[in-house]
Image (cartoon, grey):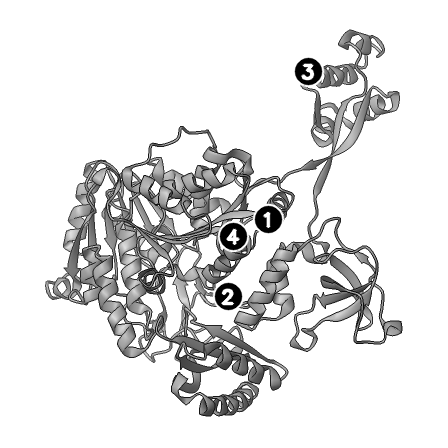
Amino acid sequence: MIYSVIVDVSASEVDRIFDYTGEGYAVGTRVLVNFANRQTEGFIVEEKQTTDYDPAKLKPIIRALDDFTAISPQLLQLGQYMRSRYHLRWVDVLRLFIPAELRKNRVKVLSKKQICLATDDDLDVILNSLKSNATMQRDLVSYLYINGSALAEDINREFGFSAVNALLKKGIVCAHDITIRRTPYKDMPATPQDKRTLYSAQQNAVDTILSDPQGKFLLHGVTGSGKTEVYLTVMERVVATGKTCIMLVPEIALTPNMLRQLRQRFGDSVALLHSGLSVGERFDEWLRLKNGEAQIAVGARSAVFAPLNNIGAIIIDEEHDSSYVSDFNPRYNTVEVADYRARQNGAMLVLGSATPSLNSYYAAKQGKLKLIEMPERINKRPLPQVEIVDMTLETRRGNKGIFSQLLKQRLQHTIENGNQAMIFLNRRGYSSFLMCTKCGYVAKCADCDVSLTVHREDNMLKCHYCGKQYYMLDKCPNCHQSSFRYGKIGTQQVVDLLRQMFPDVNILRMDADTTQNKESHGKIIDAFKNGEAQILVGTQMIAKGHDFPKVTLVGILDGDQSLHYSDYLATERTFQLITQVAGRSGRDKDVGSVVLQTYTPTHYCLQLAAKQDYVGFYKREISLREASAFPPFSEIVRILYQGEKEKDCIDLLTEHYAQICNIKSNFSRDFYYLDKMRCPLRRAEKKFRFQILLKLSQNNLDAILQQIYAACDAVKRNGVQVFVERNPQNLS
């Protein structure tokens, strides 16, 4: 038999099929093969009877690497789709489908020795066979008689090696291997809860979704409208029919809360998948899904590749979130991948958000998605009152601090009433940069073209692109003076200022610095929910998905921070972020309030966000998109070039640009824009960065893209990486 194999080598030169001989292998199996005079891992992607090569020269497959088929035929089909749509290499796609540590045999099933009695005799009979002074042996027998069995490591620690070995030799106890499951958040309480009674809007949403098992839906519900209960009820009905489900959330920070609710409803049939798990946990959860031991996969973006069959529903919460678009290799759009998997399985696709992406809402208005509206909060609770504070007026009045007088007053009132507040600032660290006031020197990363962020807690300067850390400067390396000024305030400094204002109040912080291990998210959320702190300061991690009943105040600092980016998505993202974070306030009985601080208070985006008027924002923004021919009325394509040698990047870009200009000559009406340039972030992780930007019409789009892909493949240069991105979320 001939097998087509993709070798596990990430290089464009070998991104093609190689034929090997063998017998009895399943398509999708990971195998070991001889390649380039060394043994290399690979993936079988096809089985066939003939080959275009001389059969006598084909090498045999050495062996299978696993006792299971790693990648299902359905996922291989998905891989073909992703390769075609996103211009990806085979191996980069295939690696998405398995735990990374499965490669190179860096993880395996965890087995441990278990000790139990080897006889069914009564306890007295067994004890009588032992010497009266063999105290440890007798105690161990009694323990096992009562408890049945125990791990050898626990038995050895409690009763000693000699006692265990003596009983093993006598045949009184026996040892055997058992598989130990590494469970994420195993201490998380999962007490079953009674089913909640659905409100009329929720029931209508559930009925609408279930009426079309292969439908595509956009669930647009305001914050606090009960979308999560709709998701849970839909999944419950789907699982009851014997099918499986995938539930995606945009942030790892949101997985503990969603996992808790799913375990309460579905128990052990839920598996968690995301990059924050330990190596063993991720492998064991993946294997449970693959073996059919779990029917529901929950996680961030990568969970869309869960090894499930017979999928009945894929649900994407906060579908508007930019994290669903991968901006590093391999680049792909999770919503599009989920749509393809839903079509493969004849499953329903549910996209949910209080602030849907303009693309999704436009698709719903065009009839490509079924729109379900939930315009009111549960029990008709009012949305929070949002007050916009003009910080230019605060400055003129002599208030040069980051907190307006109104926010200070509301914080004091909230604390005195025993309620909780959330302060949102989408900038972590202490300050955004460190500048010498004598010569103007700004501390920058040696590997990236960005300023370093001050982190006071560990007295370091950190690059937020590559993660490199530097010691804090006490003197300017340029003029040797010790006169520095700090840049914009980050979450660390906000906490310091709040502690000065409220020295007796407990304050928590939630950002990328305080959540570096998987347990951190859940611990911070649980502590705040349990009332261990009255103020939570955070970045966008706190902006969505959380439900804190005692939060009655949300303060938004630098509300227009993301509004002025040179990006057509800036206004949409700002509206979504403000609306989402404002929605954390007043979700229980007490009415909530929001203080939105900005230097551009009259901007339509902020005015409409303050009113929580999504439809009004959509109508205004979609008309601007149409007039300027931005998505969804066009396709933005970026070809990104990265390399350590600047000249090589420029030379390759120039060759590709000339070919794309030739393509444009054949499709002149479909090219709205074409230009080449340096990236705004000129250098990252020691690599220079350049780009070609295109704005294309929807007409002839596939034909144009295939020609662009072919042009990029035709001319390559060692040391230069080339990535083609469709509608990228980040153009820096």
Q: Nearer the viewer, residue 270 or 11?
A: 270
Q: How far across and how far down the image is residue 15, in percent?
A: 67, 73
Q: Position of residue 718 (x, y in %)?
A: 64, 83
Q: Are marks 3 and 2 in contact (CB under 8 Å)?
A: no
Q: Earlier in the sequence, mark 4 or mark 3?
A: 3
Q: Earlier in the sequence, mark 4 or mark 2?
A: 2
* Residue at the image point whose x is 79% and y is 76% from the top: 52
For the question of whether residue 601 can be seen, the reply is: yes
Q: Nearer the viewer, residue 274 or 668?
A: 668
Give residue 197's quadrant in the image.
top left
Q: Nearer the viewer, mark 3 or mark 2?
A: 2
Q: Quadrant of the C terminus?
A: bottom left
- Residue 638 against residue 549 in the figure, above or below: below
Which amino acid is tagged 4?
Gly
Query: Helix, strand, or loop for circle 3?
Result: helix
Instruction: Measure the alpha-carbon separation of dots 3 and 2.
Output: 55 Å
Disc 3 residue type (three-letter): Ile
**Where does label 4 land, which residue?**
346
Q: Label for residue 332?
A: 2
Dot 1 or dot 2, earlier in sequence: 1
Quadrant for the N terminus, please: bottom right
Q: Amino acid at mark 1?
A: Asn
Looking at the rendering, which quadrant does residue 11 occupy? bottom right
Label drawn at residue 309: 1
Q: Secondary structure at mark 2?
A: loop
Q: Are marks 4 and 3 in contact (CB under 8 Å)?
A: no
Residue annotated with mark 3: 146
Query: Can residue 188 be spotted in the picture?
Result: no
